[in-house]
Amino acid sequence: MEGNYQIDLAGSDVLANRNGERITWNQWRGEIDTAAPRLGFNVRYSGAGSTGQTIYSGYAEDLNLTEANLQLPAPTRRSPAPTTR
């Protein structure tokens, strides 16, 4: 489970008396993040011999993950800037 949620509560008694003002029903609003971060990694080979290349790509995905708080090893001159989903 991952996301922002709100719990609204309303009650009534045996005579069906209740608060009809829905705006006052909110008891809790916040973030739930019980899902582990998701990671993926791919390797692709291109060419052969002296022109052969190994291309690595991957992704990281989580509710609170942003590019600002993502830390990766220093990129090589050919690697793209990191992105998040």
Image (cartoon, rainbow, N blue to C red):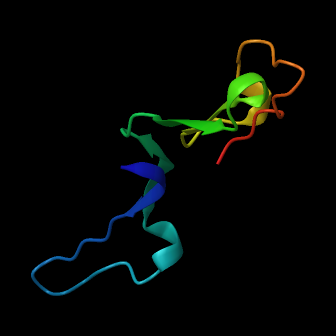
Residue at image position (49%, 68%) is: 24
Q: Is residue 2 left or right of residue 60?
A: left
Q: Residue at x 71, y 29 (%)?
A: 52
Position of residue 35 measured from the top left corner of the image (x, y, whole percent):
38, 40
- Position of residue 59 relative to residue 18, above or below, is above
Nearer the observer, 79 or 53: 53
Name the outermost residue toward the right.
Answer: 77
Residue drawn 43% across and 40% down?
Answer: 33
Dividing the picture into quarters, in which one does residue 66 lie?
Answer: top right
Q: Is residue 25 above or below residue 48?
A: below
Residue 25 visible within the image: yes
Q: Is 76 rendered above or below residue 21?
A: above
Q: Tell which residue pokes out farthest to the left in this image.
A: 14
Residue 58 appears anywhere in the view: no
- How many marks the image carries: the answer is 0
Identity of the residue furthest to the top in this view: 73
Residue 14 at x, y = what percent?
9, 81
Which of the 4 quarters of the picture holds residue 19? bottom left
Question: With 82 as the anchor, is 61 left or right in this view?
Answer: left
Q: Is residue 55 above or below residue 25?
A: above
Q: Horizontal and vertical percent for residue 65?
A: 63, 35
Q: Quadrant of residue 10?
A: bottom left
| Coordinates of residue 79 in the picture (x, y in percent) | 81, 29
Left or right: residue 48 compared with residue 41: right
Q: Nearer the viewer, residue 26 or 65?
A: 65
